[in-house]
Amino acid sequence: MARKCDICGKRTVTGNNVSHAHNKTRRVWKPNLHKVRAVVGKTHTTLKVCTRCLRSGKVVKS
């Protein structure tokens, strides 16, 4: 069960925390996903959708 938006494909991104002393430690940014019951074709399915796709109207809720 991946952390991935079913609409746009947005997923976890990795990078570095950089301190004032320029020390680097690894960190991750996770997408803001919600489980939504949506209409796909003529069926109602549950999708994991990021909030940007929800707000932009790319998903039709059932």
Image: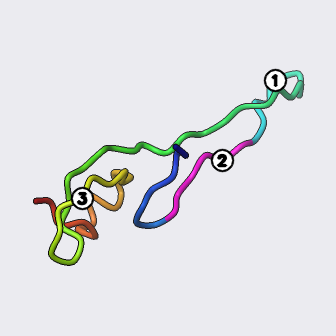
Is disc 2 surrounded by few (<14), some (14 to 19) or many (20+) residues within 10 Å?
Answer: few
- Whether tag 2 and tag 3 are in contact, CB under 8 A, the answer is no
The dominant secondary structure in magenta is loop
Tell us which disc is closer to us: 2 or 3.
Answer: 3
Mark 3, secondary structure of its residue: strand
**Which residue is situated farthest in the front direction here?**
43
Span of residues in magenta: 9-14
Distance between the alpha carbons at the discs numbered 2 and 3: 27 Å
Tell me the kind of residue under disc 2: Val
* Quarter placement of the C terminus: bottom left
Q: Circle 3 sits on which residue?
A: 45
Q: Circle 1 sits on which residue?
A: 20
- The first of marks 2 and 3 along the sequence is 2
Q: Residue at x 27, y 66 (%)?
A: 56
Tell me the kind of residue under disc 1: His
Q: Is residue 4 above or below residue 6?
A: above
Residue toward you, 53 or 46: 46
Distance between the alpha carbons at the discs numbered 2 and 1: 22 Å
Tell us which disc is closer to us: 3 or 1.
Answer: 3
Q: Residue at x 52, y 43 (%)?
A: 1
Q: Circle 2 sits on which residue?
A: 13
Tell me the kind of residue under disc 3: Thr
Q: Is residue 17 shown left or right of residue 31? A: right
- The first of marks 3 and 1 along the sequence is 1
Mark 2, secondary structure of its residue: strand
Tell us which disc is closer to us: 2 or 1.
Answer: 2
Q: Residue at x 24, y 50 (%)?
A: 36
Q: Total of numbered circles in the picture?
A: 3
